[in-house]
Image: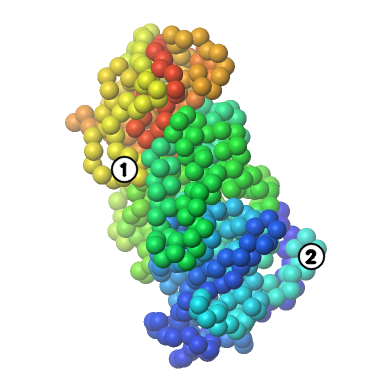
Amino acid sequence: MIRRTRIAVLAVAATLAAAPVHPGLASAAPGFTKQTLNFAVFIGPDDNVACNIVGDLYLPDGASATSRVPAVLTTSGFAKSKNDLVDTAEPLVREGYAVLAYSPLGFGGSGCKVTMDDPDFDGKAASQLVSFLGGAPGIAFRDNAYREPFPPLDVVARDNTAVDGIVHANDPRVGMIGSSYGGQVQFAAAALDPRIDAIVPMITWNDQSYSLAPNSAGPATGVSTTIPGAMKLTWAAGLGVLGAINPGPAGYAEEPSRALGCPNLPAELCTMISAGIAGYPSATDIGYLRNNSVTTYIDKIRAPVLLVQGQKDSLFDLNEARATYDALKRQGTEVKMIWQSWGHSDTVPAPGEYSAVDPRNNYENSRILDWFDHHLKDDAVSTGPEFAYFRDWVSYAGNAYPAYASASDPDVGVPRSFHLSGAGLTTQADAAAPGLQTFATGPAGLPTSSRPPDPLSRIALPDISIPGTFARWTGSPQTAPMDVVGAPKLDIVLSTDRPPNGSLDDSLVVFAKLYDIAPNGAADLIGDLVAPARIVDPSKPIAITMPAIVHRFDTGHRLALDIAGGDLNYRGGLVSYRVSVESGPGQVLTLPVVAPN
């Protein structure tokens, strides 16, 4: 638990005035000013790598040295820029916050190569921007070419703060917010800089080795496994392409060194992507990915955390947020969690959920503003429930608040067992009928399905698996709605036509999937989520933890479980297997079911 004492608190409420008071800022819209600045930062393990960062400084009218306001620092997602942060910054500045929105290293006009939110690089860069918000001189410039100095900022509220007995003078009141790549950097910065007072990481990762090569068969600590999983081919390839092309010709011309080796990306990332396409990530690859993941340094996170994760996200699934939440909770860091409707697989929020228009009447915006108001303005406002999740089956108008259920704990579901019975599923163990299904994994790890690529999952393409490459068990039509909230678990025993030799190259890779089958027979892969399982010894019982879902199986719909030998979006096992699964009471799918409401 952080021991933080504010010794002297300066004014934090914004005072509105008719004209800006900070020198050199041109009016951008009624109520605030905006100016683009450049920042000279020195990063790396030895603080000797010089980089230029470009950012937009938003200040509410009336903010001054005698009427100080709290600040929020934000950066964009991967391959995006400060220009994509307008809808994040403007609602905050209109609520009386100074906002610094910047392009991350390697993107959107900021210099140096991408470093994948490495704390020694991205974390240190963010920390130096916190120093700028606190009034540090010599960091900001009006123009990257002429380097005209920008005066020390004097409008952000400051404290003299004691953290574990160490006093940080002129500590700015500052929070952070951002999504995806701009979510993880908040952890990297907060682990280094105790001056950061509150963070809101959205749709980001816990362990990037799980994000890009998950093994749902564990054994696991959180989502981190000791055995590597199956590479997410489409997401990994997209990552490499986007990272390489986004500096544009001007960026490469300004810094030709960024084109050398792995273009605009760290060499480790290109090595990992090529190794994953050939098979699976190496121990070195996994070490690199975990170094840039909060799971490695979570014990250093002290700032209050509002975690926001997406229910439609095949890149960073709900299990990642749950792993971060659990770890923070165990160590006493203040944390709350929201599971929103949207994510990387569907980037459009539900109506009244998240919008720059009238944010106080959108559920997520209001929760975020309350979080910052409470922690940065010391307002006596509730920060909301411990856990909230969106239900797309609930009708509402306007604010999405009615569609969100809340609880004091994320474990809201009661386990309900579905035993594999012939080619069906039954909740009665003694009624589970015997049966044997056999399928083949793809040769050389090739895919055996034709569903859409994960980054393009909103495109309407058929989800078809090649006959003979998957087994399916289908339940009876629902006589009443069944609501599932949380991570399904699958306990099975497999048999194969090849004896295991204990090597990763010879390992079996299968893919577990849950479908909702409508009365007309249409099958919907729930959340576009897949659970890859790399199994070194198929002769032993296997426990698979699938990605968490929030889903209603409505009346007349049927639950279906597939175990497949391949998937278009993943690299399968290098060796082709024939796999058999025998139904019976010991083969069971467990769903966390909540009472319908």
Asked whether 99 or 453 is in front, the reply is: 453
Q: Position of residue 119 (x, y in %)?
A: 62, 54
Outermost residue to the right: 165
Q: Position of residue 325 (x, y in %)?
A: 57, 46
Q: Is residue 495 above or below residue 337?
A: above
Secondary structure under tag 2 reads: strand
Residue 197 found in image quarter? bottom right
Secondary structure under tag 1 reads: loop
Q: Is residue 42 above or below residue 334?
A: below
Query: Which residue corresponds to mark 1?
Result: 457
Outermost residue to the left: 520
Nearer-N-terminus badge (2/1)? 2
Under mark 2, the amino acid is Ile
* Quadrant (top left/top right/bottom left/bottom right) for the C terminus: top left
Residue 431 visible in image: no
Under mark 1, the amino acid is Ser
Neighbours of disc 2 within 10 Å: few (<14), some (14-19), many (20+): few
Query: Which residue corresponds to mark 2?
Result: 166
